[in-house]
Image (spheres, rainbow, N blue to C red):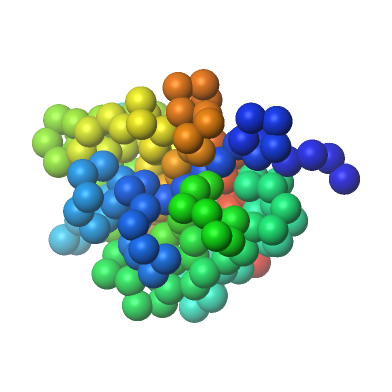
Amino acid sequence: MRSSVLLVGITALALAACSPSTTNRTPTPTNGKTSAGPSSSSPQPPGPDVPKVANPLTLTQVKEAPCNAMTERQAGELLGPGAAPKERLDGAAGPSCMWSIPSTTRPLVDVIFGRTPDGGTASVYEAKGGAYKFVEPLPPIDGYPLTAYGTTDERPSGKCSVALGATDTETIGIVTELSEANIGKKDPCDAAREAAIRVLTTVRGGN
């Protein structure tokens, strides 16, 4: 088996949900306020400059069991041996699953599914310069748009939140945080993209 892709120093590149504080929490991408992804009062179709989703995903089943978003092997590839999931179905932002190494505050990876359509990637783009001071498109994953965002740019502190476009009006939120050992050495948004690749692979497999 190949070694973990995200390693801390020589052992494991740590990922985590932004602003960790307790074990049962909803990710807070940038300023400590509860938020797992873009939000919109009513879903809007993407504008001409917003990447569209050619093959929409159905998220109904994975929302009922969010820890099915990644396999044990995938979590181990990201975080190293012993990564364990913690499901939360009643989070304010929606059902989520957080993977971590027991007895540590980081690394962590949080995957969040909104309760209702959130406006998709279009809502992230529309919030640029407003609610989100930091919006940066990342390379798409097999045609699915991926966008880093936040009320501020927290990459210097090892944090990154991304929105993976599942449909034109719905995203999957993925929040990551690097280990203390890798802050300033690794790009947390690269780590978030690695997590998004695995989530997409698993969710597509269930569609």
Question: Extreme right residue here?
Answer: 1
> Image check: 23 left or right of 206?
left
Q: Nearer the viewer, residue 181 or 194?
A: 181
Residue at 43% in and 73% down: 88
- Residue 10 appears at what percent x and percent y? 70, 30
Question: Image quadrant of residue 159?
Answer: top left
Quadrant assignment for the N terminus: top right
Position of residue 85 measured from the top left corner of the image (x, y, whole percent): 57, 66
Residue at the far top in the pictured view: 185
Image-based side of 185 in relation to 160, left or right: right
Residue 92 in view (yes/no):
yes
User: Which is nearer the eye, 71 or 154?
Assistant: 154
Which residue occupies 21% across, 44% down? 31
Q: In the depicted view, which residue is nearer to us: 163 or 165?
A: 163
Query: In which quadrant of the rendered image does the C terminus lie?
Result: bottom right
- Numbered disc total: 0
User: With respect to residue 174, does 98 lie above or below?
Assistant: below
Is residue 106 rendered to the left or right of residue 77?
Answer: left
Residue 57 shows in this picture = no
Most distant residue in the front direction: 103
Q: Who's the residue at 70% across and 37% down the image?
A: 11
x%, y% of residue 105?
46, 53
The reply, left or right, for residue 3 in relation to residue 155 is right
Q: Position of residue 171 (x, y in %)?
A: 39, 53
Q: Nearer the viewer, residue 82 or 61?
A: 82
Residue, far left: 130
> Residue at the location (65% across, 39% down)?
12
**Residue 91, relative to residue 47: is it above or below?**
below
